[in-house]
């Protein structure tokens, strides 16, 4: 007899197992998101938006009304919905390419205006769906298909600190945090607080989630874990960066 | 508290952009998303002043990509949403409009054409015909009304909302910088009092009930795995579009019956053509005029009829043949001579058209 895995209530079970590769971080982030939605009991009010990139594989993932938009444009689609129907809770789920590269001006625009939406960026240090190219988040020395000799910061810059940037530009009332699939309970907590921030109408909410792409990283389970916990952690710090009503966290606080 | 909108039927004297804002109100638009660009700016200026009075919304976005995608979001939420743009903004608008087409979203976009490409002039042109009718990596499943003046701007902006929501294809009102900035008299009215029923918008997402429990989740994508899957989806949209094309298509014609030469123009250029045709008629010349009001879908049957029964055609436009290409495709195989007068990016006066028409009539 097979025991069915426990899935969040807000997931669709009819089309599981999901379409991500084995060991992919997207499924874990969406599990945390599903739990957060369940615990807040907001399934009837959520509009879930996913992007181009591997996140698009989640267009029928949840028992949630869903819009799968163009690359990086999930933010303005969710902004459009929220502005038209403020009672809805809008989530834009994107990859780091979508959020930090092609869609970065939408992200900045939404944060500056303190749009009452929740943006979640899955940071897997590269463009996964297109076969593993350099992204703004790629680590120095990291090999990708377009940095085959390793990322050279002198030529292509340093890993982009997306959450810190959002924190710097977002107004009071915004919530900004960075979690990781290596710490699921913490990530679920951040997602819950981000959604709560939207429910309470405080302002923009943003969570970056450190994610894994074993397919393009060409890592086994141990290698994947090590890359997230050691390599990525060296550049991307987990924690809450901006919390309404609290003083902003500093890098070494 | 917001006021109730009451538009008394009356003659007014307004700029075209102000007309568009009033027409959007009259059509029951709920929200506009926009990004500044001349000569469309005053649509936003008037709308953002009027909107809060009547409980409507406005959002200035970070660019036209965002304005277009947010408009898509607005209609998905079940609101009448629109945007306005021009020139290089129209170029950016094609990405959202490609998605909007794919998802069959009833957005309304007002385009006030300016001279292109790039920044070029901010004044006037008819150079956004190709973009507005066929821009994007799709098949041009769009409804495009080309207006010839302020009454048109009012009437067709209202109609654009109804067509978009009725057929679930994006609708465009294609004006230009002259219409945008000029003042002209027109009659404004409440559509219902003229017997026009305004269609109610319906939400795509965010309906009543818990998805997966009270109702299936509403899930919209624009990604397809298989060629065949995409083909079926596209062909179904294309068939829908073809089925309704004759119903949507509109045109205006004058003295085409028995004419030796018919002058074809769209938008404001047809005003010059109309004047030229009247003058030429007074001089006893057998000249007619034809104006496709919808550039997408074109009034194909009428164009085919027209070119089958006339010896000579003159196509006049403030672009280098953008409309002519659409016409030629429809008129393909017709035996008539096709003459052209293309002046990309500049206005066209009746006298020039008259002169050109005479030249054509006198040449054998
Ligand atoms: C406008 C546009 N440019 C490029 C692409 C090609 N493209 C598809 S997925 C993708 C990368 C996605 O990377 P990311 O957002 O990091 O998501 P991931 O797949 O890594 O989760 C790109 C560039 C596209 N679909 N649209
Ligand atoms: S390619 Fe990478 S990000 Fe995409 S589904 Fe596979 S593991 Fe996940
Ligand atoms: Mg990525």
Image (cartoon, rainbow, N blue to C red):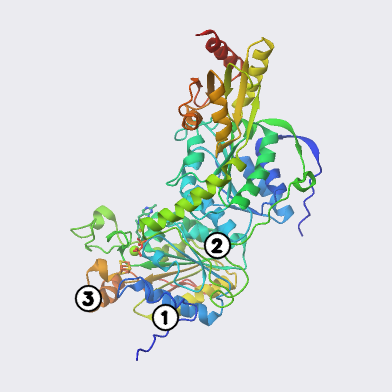
Chain under numbered label 3? A
Quadrant containing the C terminus of chain A is bottom left
- Does residue B207 sit above or below A154 in this rendering? below
Judging by the rendered image, the residue that carries numbered circle 2 is A115
| Identity of the residue furthest to the left in this view | A149
In the displayed structure image, the side of residue B130 where residue B25 appears, left or right: right
Q: Residues within 10 Å of mark 1 (few under 14, many from 20)?
A: some
Q: CA distance from mark 2 to mark 3?
A: 39 Å
- Look at 62% across and 68% down and name the residue there: A87
Q: Position of residue B362 (x, y in %)?
A: 54, 8
- Between residues A102 and B158, which one lies in front from this camera angle? B158
Q: Position of residue A170 (x, y in %)?
A: 50, 63
Q: Which mark is residue A220?
A: 3
Q: Residues within 10 Å of mark 2 (few under 14, many from 20)?
A: many
In the displayed structure image, the side of residue B272 where residue B226 appears, left or right: left
Which sits earlier in the primary sequence, circle 1 or circle 3? Answer: 1
Which sits earlier in the primary sequence, circle 2 or circle 3? Answer: 2
Q: Position of residue A169 (x, y in %)?
A: 48, 60
Judging by the rendered image, the residue that carries numbered circle 1 is A186
Q: CA distance from mark 1 to mark 3?
A: 24 Å
């Amino acid at each position: 007899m097979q025991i069915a895995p426990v899935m969040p209530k807000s997931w669709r079970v009819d089309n599981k197992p999901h379409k991500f590769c084995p060991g992919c971080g997207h499924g874990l982030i969406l599990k945390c998101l599903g739990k957060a939605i369940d615990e807040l009991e907001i399934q009837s009010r959520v509009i879930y938006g996913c992007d181009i990139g591997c996140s698009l594989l989640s267009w029928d993932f949840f028992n949630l009304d869903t819009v799968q938009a163009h690359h990086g444009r999930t933010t303005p689609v969710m902004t459009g919905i929220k502005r038209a129907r403020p009672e809805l809770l809008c989530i834009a789920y994107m990859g780091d390419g979508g959020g930090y590269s092609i869609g970065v001006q939408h992200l900045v625009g939404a944060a500056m205006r303190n749009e009452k939406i929740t943006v979640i960026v899955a940071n897997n240090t590269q463009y996964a769906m297109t076969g593993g190219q350099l992204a703004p988040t790629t680590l120095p020395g990291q090999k990708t298909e377009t940095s085959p000799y390793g990322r050279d910061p002198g030529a292509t810059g340093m890993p982009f600190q997306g959450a810190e940037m959002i924190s710097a530009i977002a107004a009071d009332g915004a919530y900004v945090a960075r979690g990781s699939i290596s710490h699921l309970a913490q990530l679920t907590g951040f997602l819950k607080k981000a959604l709560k921030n939207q429910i309470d109408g405080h302002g923009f909410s943003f969570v970056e989630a450190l994610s894994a792409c074993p397919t393009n990283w060409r890592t086994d389970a141990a290698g994947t874990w090590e890359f997230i916990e050691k390599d990525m952690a060296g550049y991307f710090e987990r924690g809450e960066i901006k919390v309404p009503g609290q003083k902003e966290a500093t890098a070494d606080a | 508290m917001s006021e109730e909108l009451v538009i008394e039927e009356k003659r007014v004297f307004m700029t075209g952009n102000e007309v568009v804002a009033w027409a959007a109100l009259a059509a029951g638009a709920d929200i506009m998303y926009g990004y500044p660009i001349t000569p469309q700016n005053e649509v936003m200026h008037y709308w953002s002043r009027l909107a809060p009075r009547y409980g409507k919304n406005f959002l200035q976005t970070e660019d036209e990509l965002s304005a277009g995608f947010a408009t898509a979001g607005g209609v998905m939420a079940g609101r009448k949403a629109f945007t306005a743009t021009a020139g290089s903004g129209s170029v950016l608008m094609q990405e959202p409009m490609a998605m909007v087409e794919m998802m069959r979203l009833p957005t309304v976009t007002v385009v006030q054409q300016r001279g292109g490409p790039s920044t070029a002039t901010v004044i006037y042109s008819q150079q956004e015909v190709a973009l507005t009718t066929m821009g994007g990596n799709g098949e041009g499943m769009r409804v495009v009304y080309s207006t010839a003046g302020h009454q048109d701007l009012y009437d067709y902006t209202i109609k654009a909302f109804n067509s978009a929501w009725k057929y679930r294809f994006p609708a465009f009102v294609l004006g230009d910088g002259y219409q945008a900035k000029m003042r002209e008299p027109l009659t404004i009215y409440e559509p219902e009092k003229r017997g026009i029923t305004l269609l109610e918008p319906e939400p795509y997402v965010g309906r009543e009930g818990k998805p997966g429990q009270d109702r299936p989740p509403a899930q919209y994508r624009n990604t397809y795995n298989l060629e065949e899957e995409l083909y079926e989806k596209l062909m179904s949209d294309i068939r829908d579009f073809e089925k309704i094309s004759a119903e949507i298509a509109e045109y205006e014609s004058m003295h085409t019956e028995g004419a030796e030469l018919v002058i074809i123009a769209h938008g404001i250029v047809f005003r010059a053509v109309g004047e030229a045709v009247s003058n030429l008629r007074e001089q006893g010349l057998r000249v007619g005029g034809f104006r496709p009001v919808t550039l997408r879908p074109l009034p194909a049957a009428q164009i085919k009829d027209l070119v089958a029964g006339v010896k000579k055609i003159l196509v006049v436009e403030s672009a280098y043949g953008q409309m002519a290409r659409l016409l030629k495709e429809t008129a393909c195989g017709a035996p008539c001579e096709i003459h052209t007068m293309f002046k990309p990016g500049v206005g066209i006066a009746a006298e020039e058209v008259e002169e050109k028409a005479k030249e054509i009539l006198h040449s054998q």
